[in-house]
Amino acid sequence: MSSAFKGEAIWIIGASSGIGRALAIELAGQGAQLILSARRQSELDALKRDLGDQHMVYTLDVSNTEDVLQTTEAIRSVLPRIDRVIFLAAAYTPMSLRALDIAATRKMVDVNVMGAFNIVHAILPMLCAQDKGQLALCASVAGYTGLPDGQRRAGADGHQSAPAGAGALAAGGGVGDPVDAAAGRPVVPGRRRHQR
């Protein structure tokens, strides 16, 4: 068993299933102390039972700004630092433009795009204060290629535009890169530090 992440506090948002769950299992096996978040408490509890009691569970609705801020503060009150934050939360309801469900579309945008912005809003000040840390925003390739039953040509699929929005947030702001705490902003690849 590798110990590449031994002692690191890693917050996985969207940990209850899919890639987030698989990543949690892998990182726990490498010695990380995990903070597991998702909307579904029962699935988080089951994952914690599988991984061990040393890991923490916080239910979280990333589309709710106050919930994200309160959860971030709750975690900071029990941990001196968070080394990495990995955003994997996502929502997807397949549909065509002819059968557009505006409520489902709004939920996809709220989770996939606004959720990413809510996480950045809550986490970036903490990473700057720590002078170190990593924030990874993960978005679906569907933002670029489309998914079955999505509006590929029209570009109005909430799932297609939502991952593209989260991807643009990460790429445009350099959020996935190290934080330059002295300048109070993320380091953008190809740009000198402290450049205005």
Image (tube, rainbow, N blue to C red):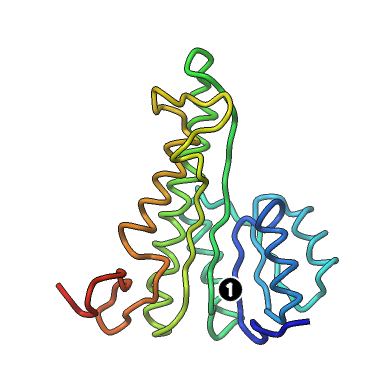
User: In the rendered view, would you say 45 is above or below 40?
Assistant: below
The percent coordinates of residue 136 (x first, y second) are: 49, 64
Q: Residue furthest top?
A: 98
Q: Is residue 66 left or right of residue 186?
A: right
User: In the rendered view, would you say 135 is above or below 119?
Assistant: below
**Point 51% across, 56% down: residue:** 138
On-image quarter of the C terminus: bottom left
Mark 1: few, some, or many residues within 10 Å (few <14, many ≥20)? some
On-image quarter of the N terminus: bottom right
Q: Which residue is mark 1?
A: 75
> Which image quadrant for residue 32?
bottom right
**Point 24% across, 80% down: residue:** 193
The percent coordinates of residue 182 (x first, y second) are: 27, 84
Q: Is residue 100 left or right of residue 39?
A: left
Number of numbered labels in the structure image: 1
The percent coordinates of residue 95 (x first, y second) are: 56, 23
Of 95 and 143, the residue lying toward us: 143
Of 39 and 168, the residue lying toward us: 168
Q: Is residue 29 left or right of residue 112?
A: right
**Point 46% across, 78% down: residue:** 133
Element on which disc 1 rests: helix
Three-letter amino acid code of the residue under disc 1? Ile
> Which image quadrant for residue 60?
bottom right
